[in-house]
Amino acid sequence: MTFWEHLDELRKVLFRSALILLGAAVIFFIFKDFMFGIVFAPTDDNFVLYRLADRILALLHQEPLGPFKLSIINIDLPAQFFIHISTSFYFAIVVCAPILLYQLWTFVSPALYPNEKRGAIKAFSFAAVFFYTGVLVGYFLLFPLTLRFLGTYQVMDEVANQISLKSYISTFFSLILILGVVFELPTVAALLSKFGLLYKHTLKKYRRHAFVVLLIIAAIITPTGDPFTLMAVGLPLYGLYEISIMMCRSKKTEDEV
């Protein structure tokens, strides 16, 4: 194929991806109550994490977390409409990520050898699994903990919290998508190992250093300062580091190949 033929194929892929994304966004836009029911679920003490925490505290004979209800306000006239649109696209991107990657795959795959195709398919599969795992951890753990702490934190009783809709949505998607990206660590490590840029023994050598660095990263992406939240985020990140070690090749095997 000539350069212009390749460009035409890329245009078709981008056009199909845009249609898929637009169609999904329209569906989410229509089912507004369902979508925002998911988004605002952590603002109520009936959220699954809060109920689970109360049960654990009860088993430990500790006081429950107590009632929690966060009210969201809007202070900008067109904000609700535009946030409705942007949230629909965010949901479409998250849900349609595997389909969009498949569209990219249809463009790239003809240029790969059979062994390269097998490796790429495996990498795409792992990337999707780890991304969604990170999104779920962000939704069910990181964001609720952050919201519960910052939403109820007051410098003085006289200063009441009034959380704006724009602030809530921005924090919601930023934290969740950050976790989704961070959870791609094993996939990146596997690809670097495949290209001979990273080996198993290297990650093992800097294991202790990595634990400290990952705790610092956990402290950065979690606005709360309590040790429980820090460890709740830091330990899964360190678990990803151990998974990265298992997914990397050893130098000996690489030399033999």
Image (cartoon, rainbow, N blue to C red):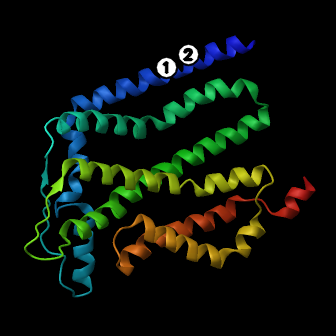
Number of callouts? 2
Q: Mark 1 highlights which residue? A: 16
Residue 178 location, x and y as percent? 45, 54
Q: Mark 2 highlights which residue? A: 12
Amino acid type for the residue under numbered disc 2: Lys
Question: Marks 2 and 1: in contact by CB < 8 Å?
Answer: yes
> For numbered disc 2, what is the local secondary structure?
helix
Check disc 1: other Cα within 10 Å, few if <14, some if 14-19, many if 20+.
some
Front residue of 166 and 53: 166
Residue 95 location, x and y as percent? 40, 38
Q: Quadrant of residue 158?
A: bottom left
Taking the image as shown, residue 120 lies to the left or right of residue 83, namely right
Front residue of 217 and 232: 217
**Residue placed farthest to the left in the image?**
158
Amino acid type for the residue under numbered disc 1: Arg
Question: Residue visible at 32% across and 54% down?
Answer: 171
Q: Which mark is residue 190?
A: none
Q: Quadrant of residue 30?
A: top left
Question: Residue visible at 64% across and 76% down?
Answer: 209
Residue 25 to residue 62: above or below:
above
Taking the image as shown, residue 186 lies to the left or right of residue 73, namely right
